[in-house]
Image: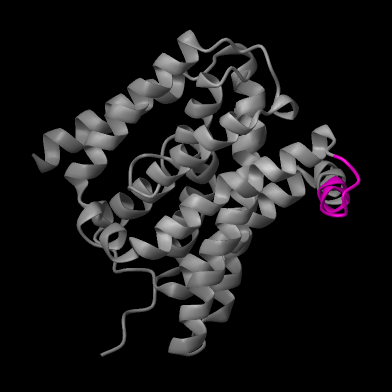
Amino acid sequence: MPPAEPSLLQVIVLAVVQGITEFLPISSSAHLILVPQVFGWPDQGLAFDGAMHVGTLAAVLWYFRKNLWPLTRDFGASLRGQGLTPNGRLAWAVLLGTLPAAIAGLLLHDLIEGPLRSPKVIAATTIGYGLLLLLADRIGAQRRDEYTFRWRDAALIACAQVLALVPGTSRSGITMTAGLLAGLTRAGAARFSFLLSIPITALAGGYEILKLVQAGAPSELDKALLAAAAAAVSGYLAIAFLMRLLQSRGMTPFVVYRLLLGAYLIAVFY
């Protein structure tokens, strides 16, 4: 029997959750696992997972549309041996920061999609990496922006992004944590985290769409398009909200949220 089609409410709620939590340092994977469990919803299926990733990819591409051409241009120039500008260095940092997570994701896919999706694992990572984010926010030098990247900074953030494959870690949260520990400002760490989301989200969405093509076209294309649109709008608003909040509040509100969520998971599932 084929899996049940998600309802319109499920599509909208999960797409908005994906859009918001993909960019805020609170873990999108954790929320996409837990929200259906709370409401007793069936798995939304490959079509909607792929659509939501397309939506969040559209959000970050649109938000950083003015930055992407200089990065692409100077990256191409560096390949032609024309020197390495700050834009070119940043583009290389994004590429190098993506490769380890992409390789680990392929090699550990079954583990990530199986045992590690446990609410107990999510509770531990939600609290543990939340506290690490708070520590980085307090002790980080916060003297440099993302254009002053050193190669060891890129290596640190690349290793951090591998950890984000574990549900509850938060890809944006752990990469911002690493950026802060490397001495980036809050805004610089956030901007680099968002740029870093472009290739990894494209790879994740492409993988899901490939599996979808192999399984056959979705029966409700209109809902998939709605999911993409809702994720795009909510994702864009989440980026804008975070960039404003970081100027005044720092990471503390997100750490508090993570601790409360972790405590709830412990109370319910332990």
Q: Can residue 240 be seen by looking at this rendering?
A: yes
Query: Looking at this rendering, what residue extends furthest in the front direction?
Result: 81
Q: Residue at x 84, y 53 (%)?
A: 76
| 106 over 170 or under it: above or below | below
Picture coordinates of residue 112, whole percent (x, y): 30, 57
Residue 66 shown left or right of residue 46 in the figure? right
| 261 over 102 or under it: above or below | above
| 111 over 73 or under it: above or below | below
| 51 over 60 or under it: above or below | below
Q: Quadrant of the N terminus?
A: bottom left
Q: Residue at x 48, y 81 (%)?
A: 212
Picture coordinates of residue 152, whole percent (x, y): 57, 30
Query: Looking at this rendering, what residue extends furthest in the left direction?
Result: 270
Q: Quadrant of the C terminus?
A: top left
Query: Looking at this rendering, what residue extends furthest in the right direction?
Result: 82
Residue 177 shown left or right of residue 108 in the figure? right
By secondary structure, the bulk of the magenta-drawn segment is best described as helix
- Of the pair 98 and 186, the residue shown nearer to us: 98
Residue 82 lies within the magenta run:
yes
Question: Exactly how many numbered labels are in the figure?
Answer: 0
- Of the pair 42 and 129, the residue shown nearer to us: 129
Picture coordinates of residue 268, whole percent (x, y): 13, 40
Residue 70 lies within the magenta run:
no
Residue 47 shown left or right of residue 70 in the figure? left
Q: Can residue 24 be seen by looking at this rendering?
A: no
Q: Tell me which colouring the rendered structure shows.
A: one colour
Q: Which residues are magenta?
A: 74-83
Picture coordinates of residue 119, whole percent (x, y): 20, 47
Q: Residue at x 57, y 10 (%)?
A: 141
